[in-house]
Image (cartoon, rainbow, N blue to C red):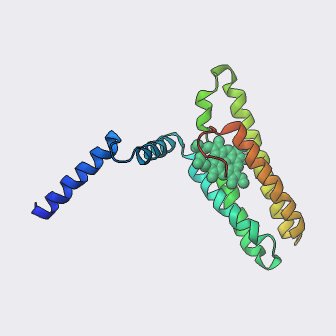
Amino acid sequence: MSHRLMIGKSLLAIAVSAILTGAAAPTVGAAAAKGAEEKVKKGPMAEHMETIDDAMGKLRRTIRKAELNTESLKLLQEMQQEAVVCKGMVPPMAAKVPEAQRQQFLANFRKDMDKFVIALSNMEIAILDGDNAKAQDVYKTLKTMEDEGHDKYKEQDETPKK
Ligand code: HEM
């Protein structure tokens, strides 16, 4: 091992132990710990939700313009596929629901995801009909479904409200 590498390694060790003991910057240490905690909590569903989130951001602009309808249809196809995947998953919060109520909780989650998939179809039909005003109305419904779905089925400390 080269001398330079060794110095580098020991500096790194000092930095790591300073962070771990909280000696250097307690606020940075606390923030890092909080980040790690969030990562552990998020389930595989979160990744599919992130894809839906990205598409939703793009859709907000594309549905305003009829000439971008092909792009909107592509985004909707992707969102619906991801939503169907989520529908078959178990939200991490289910583990915290008392066993006696868990089955009902999962049925409600599935029903609400079904309604979300239906709303995506409604937007797709509006776009295929060239009714972009209707598509913009459905967009508002999707946003409400997102908020209500997260209130009911997502652990609240995972994402601070923007
Ligand atoms: C436009 C609609 C939606 C968008 C853009 C969206 C976006 C997201 C994002 C970005 C996350 C990850 C956030 C995080 O944990 O840091 C998430 C998680 C989650 N969402 Fe959605 N969501 C939508 C609709 C819904 C609906 C309709 C439901 C339920 C009926 C739902 C249930 C959940 C649950 C349970 C999680 C937690 C997943 C986990 O921790 O593994 N979402 N969503």
Nearer to the camera, 80 or 52: 52
Residue that sits furthest to the top in the current view: 100
Q: Is residue 5 left or right of residue 27?
A: left
Q: Position of residue 122 (x, y in %)?
A: 84, 58
Is residue 84 visible in the rendered structure shown here? Answer: no
x 70%, y 56%: residue: 80
Q: Is residue 159 above or below residue 101?
A: below
Nearer to the camera, 106 or 55: 55
Q: Position of residue 85 (x, y in %)?
A: 63, 49
x 69%, y 23%: residue: 101
Q: Is residue 100 above or below residue 116?
A: above
Q: Is residue 157 above or below residue 105?
A: below
Nearer to the camera, 96 or 103: 96
x 60%, y 53%: residue: 48
Q: Is residue 49 left or right of residue 111?
A: left
x 67%, y 48%: residue: 161
Quarter containing the N terminus: bottom left
Q: Is residue 38 left or right of residue 154?
A: left
Which quarter of the figure has residue 139? bottom right
Q: Position of residue 75 (x, y in %)?
A: 69, 66
Which quarter of the figure has residue 149? top right
Nearer to the camera, 80 or 41: 41
